[in-house]
Image (cartoon, helix red, strand yellow):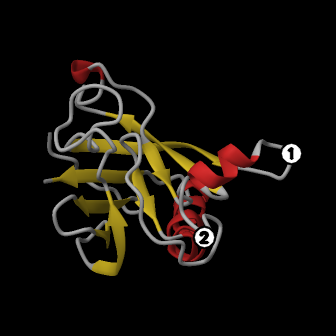
Amino acid sequence: MKIKLKENDVKCVVSGHGHTMKCFNYEGILKWTIPCRADGVNGPGFAGPGGDTPPGIYEIGLITKTNKSEPLSIWHSYGRWFADLVELENQEASRGRAGVGVHGGGTGLKEPLAAEQGWKPTLGCVRLQNRDLETRFIPMCQFIKSKGGKIYVEVVW
């Protein structure tokens, strides 16, 4: 699937092997690069719950801020934010999957809410360091959405 970006759109490319997320504006100009992980606890592979993040193009849907009233398990798993990845190519459903997103945190890490918490595999999501999530990715998503734009995320392996 080829996405034609409009003026207020951006595209983030997640490299599963390269452990990076690169953000490009609608003209294809690189705006920033941050570390990420797309490794699933049941990877390598993309089938079934807990596999690596399936390759393909997604759109950022609902962005949720977690809060102190939620169980610590939510905070530890996701950090303070969760951005839903809406599949555009049936890459989740065709593999018996649903519900992947972009988040920080990390259950089992020494300090899952620290600015640089470290890395743990997810249940199939893209994990960012909390600092990058909170200072780059989420503000960019909020800004683009406020301008009526879309945020596309392409996962490649």
Residue at x 63%, y 54% (from the top left corner): 76
Q: Taking 123 as reference, is 148 above or below it?
A: below
Q: Taking 139 as reference, is 90 above or below it?
A: above
The answer, for residue 65, to whether it is visible in the render is no
Residue at x 13%, y 54% (from the top left corner): 157
Closest to the observer, 15 or 26: 15
Where residue 32 appears, x then y in whole percent? Answer: 36, 80
Residue to which mark 2 is pinned? 134
The answer, for residue 57, to whether it is visible in the render is yes
Q: Which quadrant does the N terminus fall into?
A: top left
Where residue 95 appears, x then y in whole percent? Answer: 23, 23
Residue to which mark 1 is pinned? 69
Looking at the picture, which amino acid does disc 1 mark? Ser
Q: Is residue 108 left or right of residue 75?
A: left
Q: Is residue 75 left or right of residue 22?
A: right
Q: Secondary structure at mark 1?
A: loop
Query: Considering only order in the chain, which callout, 2 or 1, is on the residue closer to the N terminus?
Result: 1
